[in-house]
Image (spheres, helix red, strand yellow):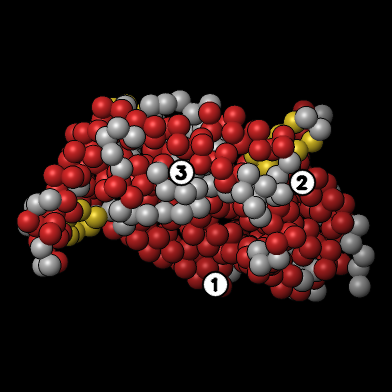
Amino acid sequence: MYFSIILVKRLVKMMLLFEIKKVLSKPVNKIALLILAITLAVVSYFAVISVSYTDENGSSFSGPAAAVRLREEKNKWAGRVTEDVLKKVLQENSRINQSPEYLSTDVTQNNIAYSEKQGFSDIREMINFAFSDFQEYDYYRADKVSESEVGKLYENRIESLKTWLSSNGISERWSQAEKDYLIRQFDALDTPLYYEYSDGWRSLLEYAPTLIMFTVLIAGFLVSGIFPGEFTLKADSIYFSCRFGRDRAVRAKIGAGFVIVSAVYWIMILGYSLVVLLSLGAGGGGCAIQAGRGWKSFYNITCFQEYLLTIFGGYVGILFVLGLAMLISAKTRSAVFAVTIPFIILFVPSILTSMNILTGVLGFFPDQLLQIPSAVSSYNLLEIGVFVTGAVPVLFVLYLILYGALLPVTYRLYRKSELR
């Protein structure tokens, strides 16, 4: 009995490896993997060069060398962004604005003036956001803020949200409970914010959704032929007449899809993360996202926590999308449908965004898991009774459950396939 169990386990393992080998041995799939590798290199390159620095001569350059210089400048301002720090930023900003370089009509001289602002540029952006209307942005707003009012920066963040939520055309979008939830989230932010150089994380998160979406499309192509394979080769009668053809062999196909998708995804995302963070630096992971581009986000998380949500959200999303693709291919016996599903899920929501009636619903589509940095900047909420929460945690729970439900359905559909 013991040896029989060992034999069966080895057989199942062999079936799994055989299914994986079938996928990876196809010339067209090898080309797909090559395209994926090129995509990784290209996206990583653009992420790395997205960090730029302007030196004291007004010359700009980008990449790892720029990141080193920029980190030195920004970390001179590292620490809590208190009222005293904000006043100092205004003083430095005003001094530079009155310099001959800033007032010059020569672009190079203007760049020299800009180079002096790089160290506190992010804090200056926080002032721009805080003292502009909620849905507006004025790059020069910080030039008009006085030292006596800059101390209200965090208070203004909450007040501008309240004003926006009560404005015409906006107040009807959310219930009072949802409005109260957003205000509580804004109020719960730990202030004064801690600040330091975090451009490595920002660049990483900016380009991560692009890489994840390309990975979904290519991985969908790789697994598209797992279930229709036997029917395409007219070997289905032999396959299903074998002893384990309708149980363990089917599970091996499902397992192969999971292994291939998981391996491809984590190799891509971890390779990308290593390249970008080693090139640009991993400092600032503990900074709140509100200390950067996420000023208006109601999710009180750090850059590192947003990164974790992004990579695990992408993983849940890719499992669901490709799990659905394999289900369709098992039902239709067509690889074409399996390849089409990822395209539909990724691009149809962008077409439907023009329909205002679907705005709230689109925030819960699976494509949102593949672009978490965008999702944490959106105001998609779920209200059930007295319970209100943002869409992001709901997306994780919802699509993990749906993916778990897809597996037994796919197994039963393919297991009961009729021979033709």
Q: Image quarter for residue 290?
A: top left
Packing grade of label 3 (10 A; few <14, some 14-19, many >=20) is: many
Pick the residue in front: 369 or 162.
162
Q: Is residue 218 left or right of residue 205?
A: right
Q: Earlier in the sequence, mark 1 or mark 3?
A: 1
Residue at 16% across, 51% down: 97
User: Marks 1/2: CA distance?
Assistant: 33 Å
Say if residue 317 shows up in the picture.
Answer: no
Q: Position of residue 281 (x, y in %)?
A: 29, 41
Labels 1 & 3 near each other (Cβ < 8 A): no
Q: Position of residue 262 (x, y in %)?
A: 58, 48
What element does badge 1 sit on?
helix
Residue at 70% across, 49% down: 173
What residue sits right under mark 2 in the picture? Answer: 402
Please, is residue 230 above or below residue 163 in the view?
A: below
Please, is residue 91 above or below residue 336 in the view?
A: above
Q: Image quarter for residue 394?
A: top right
Residue at 54% across, 72% down: 27
User: Marks 3/2: CA distance?
Assistant: 30 Å
Q: Amino acid at mark 1?
A: Pro
Task: Pick the quarter of the image with the C terminus.
Answer: bottom right
Packing grade of label 1 (10 A; few <14, some 14-19, many >=20) is: few
Packing grade of label 2 (10 A; few <14, some 14-19, many >=20) is: some
What residue sits right under mark 1 in the picture? Answer: 27
Q: Earlier in the sequence, mark 1 or mark 2?
A: 1
Q: Which mark is residue 324?
A: none
What residue sits right under mark 3 in the picture? Answer: 294
Q: Amino acid at mark 3?
A: Gly
